[in-house]
């Protein structure tokens, strides 16, 4: 799957990419300072964390998108690493490390991803993991694609990733200078709108909106934007007062939670009531006599 051993097959792969990606091709790109990614619509600043709330067919979804301060070499190019974690109803279902680099023309290239998918049973116990969707430019015939252009012309199309039979995402610029109103009241002007698709899921075309100096602020299923969507809810900087450094914390006895203002004693039950427009709402919280390992 994905790669072919014969030269003729590899040439065919390159021909297919040439049909969908406008010049320059990845092989022609020059990378003098590839980890300085300051593209107008996709800046990747190390330490930046984007949080998204979303709705999927499986329930509520939270996406944590963090630009790490480490790099890796992919297909001969030093690349920025972005960790992208997807949670459904508080369960981690996908943990991905994406690799990006910006060429001297300002184009941001996507060089692959290391994916771990998690599967759970009905009791939310982990059944196992797989790496479906993973690919790396230069391995098994996979070729880096353009994730964000440097110049923006309506109807320009480009291949975002190419790993035959596994990852063949494409995009087209739909509109410029779009205003996007998010559900939390935030308003973004001068946004770029793209339409993203792949040949394996023809019914799952997405619209994406990119705000200047921010990046993605909304993703939505084209056919039903409210059924499956995700919106930006916050941007934070790791190491600042906004986001404490979890890696520096020491946990000798982490299940003894005796904080003065938030004690968690096993067996404690709190019940709350609120008068809402839909009637009386009752909320019950209980500290269970059970634990689970999260992030070590």
Image (cartoon, rainbow, N blue to C red):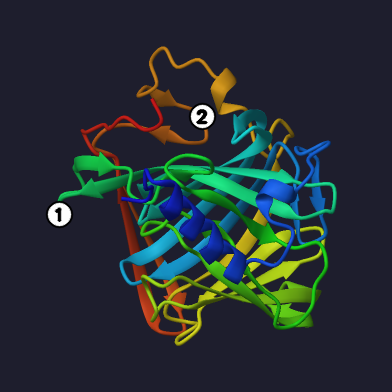
**Of the image marks 1 and 2, the number of the one nearer the N terminus:** 1
Q: Can residue 250 be seen in this view?
A: yes
Q: Nearer the viewer, residue 177 or 259?
A: 177
Pinpoint residue 67: horizontal percent, then vertical percent. 65, 41
Residue 110 numbered mark, or none: none
In the figure, residue 245 lies in which quadrant?
A: top right
User: Which residue is at 66% across, 36% downward?
Assistant: 79
Extreme residue in the bottom direction: 223
Residue 292 position (above or below residue 25):
above
Left of 183 or right of it: where is 151? right
Where does the image place residue 258, in percent across and percent down from the top left? 43, 25
- Could you say which is closer to the camera, residue 61 or residue 110? 110
Of residues 219 and 37, which is closer to you in this image? 37
Label 1 environment density (alpha carbons within 10 Å; few <14, some 14–19, many ≥20): few
Nearer to me, 160 or 188: 160
Q: Is label 1 or label 2 in front?
A: 1
Query: What residue is rendered at 75% in x and 42% in y?
Result: 45
- Residue 96 visible, this orientation: no
Secondary structure of the residue carrying tag 2 is: loop
Instruction: Give the alpha-carbon distance from disc 1 to disc 2, as whole Å.
Output: 36 Å
Q: Which residue is drawn at 50% across and 54% down?
A: 11
Q: Name the residue under label 1.
A: 122
Measuring from the top left, give residue 286's x and y in whole percent: 28, 46
Instruction: Relative to 215, say whether 223 is above or below.
Output: below
- Residue that numbered label 2 is attached to: 260
């Amino acid at each position: 799957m994905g790669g072919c051993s014969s030269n003729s097959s590899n040439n065919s792969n390159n021909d297919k990419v040439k049909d969908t990606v406008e010049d320059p091709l990845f092989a022609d790109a020059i990378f003098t300072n590839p980890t300085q990614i300051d593209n107008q619509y996709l800046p990747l600043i190390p330490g930046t964390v984007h949080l998204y709330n979303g709705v999927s067919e499986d329930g509520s979804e939270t996406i944590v998108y963090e630009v790490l301060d480490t790099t890796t070499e992919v297909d001969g190019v030093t690349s920025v690493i972005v960790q992208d974690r997807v949670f459904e109803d508080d369960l981690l279902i996908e943990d991905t490390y994406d690799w990006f680099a910006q060429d001297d023309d300002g184009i941001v290239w996507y060089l692959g991803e290391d994916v771990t998918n998690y599967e759970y049973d009905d009791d939310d116990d982990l059944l196992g993991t797989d790496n479906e969707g993973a690919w790396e430019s230069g391995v098994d015939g996979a070729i880096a694609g353009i994730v964000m252009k440097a110049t923006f012309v309506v109807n320009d199309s480009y291949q975002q990733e190419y790993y035959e039979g596994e990852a063949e995402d494409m995009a087209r610029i739909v509109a410029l200078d779009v205003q996007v109103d998010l559900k939390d009241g935030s308003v973004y002007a001068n946004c770029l709108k793209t339409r993203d698709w792949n040949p394996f899921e023809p019914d799952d075309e997405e619209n994406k909106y990119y705000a200047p100096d921010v990046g993605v602020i909304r993703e939505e299923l084209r056919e039903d934007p409210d059924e499956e969507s995700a919106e930006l809810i916050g941007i934070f900087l790791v190491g600042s007062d906004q986001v404490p450094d979890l890696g520096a914390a020491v946990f000798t006895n982490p299940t003894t939670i005796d904080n003065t203002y938030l004690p968690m004693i096993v067996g404690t039950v709190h019940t709350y009531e609120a008068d809402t427009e839909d009637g009386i709402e009752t909320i019950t919280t209980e500290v269970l006599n059970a634990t689970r390992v999260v992030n070590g």
